[in-house]
Every structure is written in C-alpha cells, then in structure tokens.
Image (spheres, rainbow, N blue to C red):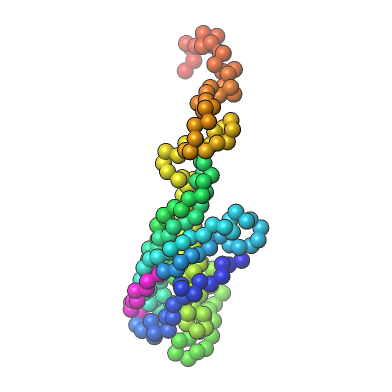
C-alpha cells in the first residue's frame, strides 16, 4: 500500500512538458510532516515514525519521454535510540534521483500507451492532470538515509543489563562490564595441553 499524497509535494509540470528536451525547473520542497512507513495497520511502531520539518530543493529536467528529478532533502526524523530506547529527533539528509513519465500527451490530452517491453516499474507517473507527486520519492529517500542503529548521542551508555535503568540518566550501581560467563570453559583451558605438531605444514 502506498503512502497517501502530501499536497505540499505535488507540482504541475504541464508547461515543462511542452518545452524542449533539456529545459529545467527548480522546485522548493517543504512540508511540516511526512509519514515514512507504509500505514498497513500491522505494525504500530512503524506507523508512528515520521519526518518533520521536511525541506529541500530539486531540479526537474525535461527528457524525451518524461522528466528527471534530482535533488536533496533533509528532515528531523522521530525515532528511538537503539541503545537506551529514548525517543529522539534525528537530523537526516538524503538525495533523490527519480524519473517520471506522463500518462497523457500534454498537447492532445490522449492517453499514452507504451509497449510492454518499455514499461518500467521503477519509473513514477505524472497523472492525467500533469501533476507530479514527489511524496513517495522523498519518503523513500529519507527512509534509506536513516542509520541502521540510530543513537541519541555517540557515547550513549544504553540500558543496565541487570535492572534496565537508562545509564545516561542514573547510576544504578550494577557492574556493567563483568566477565562473560559463556567463555568460562575456554578460560580454563591450558595452552600446554595442546602441543604444537612441528611436522605440520
């Protein structure tokens, strides 16, 4: 299921489609919030993740068979720290480069049909009213740019493994760096019990 359209990220490109190949437009991208996860109702944690204060710029270039959008976008993404689980607002920068194809001829108003071998699922469509919706390209760009393990700060101390306390806010007194008992059997081994075979290659 695709995210719903964000009207702040919809642009009319009718005039550009009438111009020669190579013609360009500069767009300002700005919206107060944008959901970054598809709202399918199955994952409440994902549904709550959104980007706020989305801003950026894009250049739109006329191609033979549509337009090319290239730009940069940034936002403050609402996430959880991967160590301490605190809610954080993480600045995220992303680049986007996507191609859009018209669904109708801008001059005649007739629907454009393309041979099956020329269809490309990775290309976005410009609708019958010559509106180009950048909601999904911006969403995907920001989503890919999110770190795999977001942190509230580089030296985040995380949670106590004993009581679960947030070590950034309190010192619970539990030892955090004790020996790992899973390796106790290996520590008991004596290297002299394993003589080296001098004939081995």
Query: What x and y, as percent, mark residue 171?
Result: 49, 31
Residue 191 visible (yes or no): yes
The image shows a total of numbered marks equal to: 0
Residue at the (56%, 13%) spot, across then down? 189
Front-lying residue, 56 or 107: 56
Quadrant location, the N terminus:
bottom right
Front-lying residue, 122 or 33: 33
Residue at the (53%, 63%) spot, across then down? 35
* Residue 25 lies in the magenta stretch: yes
User: Relative to 84, does residue 55 appear above or below in the rendering?
Assistant: below
Farthest bottom residue? 108
Residue at the (62%, 56%) spot, across then down? 44
For this view, does 82 lie left or right of residue 70?
Answer: right
For this view, does 181 lie left or right of residue 109?
Answer: right
Q: Is the magenta stretch mostly helix, strand or loop?
A: strand
Farthest right residue? 42
User: Relative to 2, does residue 21 appear above or below in the rendering?
Assistant: below
Toward which corner of the image does residue 116 lie, by quadrant? bottom right
For this view, does 59 lie left or right of residue 190?
Answer: left
Query: Which portion, as a residue range, is magenta?
Result: 21-29
Residue 124 visible (yes or no): no
Query: What x and y, as percent, mark residue 51?
Result: 48, 60
Residue at the (46%, 45%) spot, across then down? 151
Query: What x and y, as percent, mark residue 106?
Result: 45, 86
User: Relative to 159, does residue 45 appear above or below in the rendering?
Assistant: below
* Residue 69 lies in the magenta stretch: no
Query: What x and y, as percent, mark residue 114?
Result: 53, 79
């Amino acid at each position: 299921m695709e995210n719903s359209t964000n009207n702040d990220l919809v642009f009319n490109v009718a005039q550009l489609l009438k111009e020669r190949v190579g013609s360009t437009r500069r767009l300002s991208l700005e919206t107060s919030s944008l959901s970054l996860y598809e709202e399918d109702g199955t994952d409440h944690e994902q549904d709550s993740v959104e980007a706020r204060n989305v801003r950026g710029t894009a250049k739109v270039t006329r191609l033979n068979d549509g337009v090319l959008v290239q730009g940069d976008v940034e936002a403050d993404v609402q996430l959880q720290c991967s160590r301490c689980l605190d809610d954080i607002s993480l600045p995220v920068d992303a680049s986007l480069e996507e191609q859009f194809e018209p669904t109708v001829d801008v001059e005649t108003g007739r629907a454009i049909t393309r041979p099956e071998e020329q269809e490309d699922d990775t290309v976005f469509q410009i609708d019958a009213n010559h509106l180009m919706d950048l909601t999904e390209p911006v969403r995907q760009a920001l989503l890919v740019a999110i770190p795999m393990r977001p942190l509230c700060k580089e030296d985040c101390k995380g949670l106590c493994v004993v009581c679960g306390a947030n070590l950034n806010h309190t010192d619970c007194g539990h030892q955090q760096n004790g020996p790992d008992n899973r390796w106790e059997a290996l520590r008991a081994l004596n290297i002299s019990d394993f003589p080296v075979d001098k004939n081995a290659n």
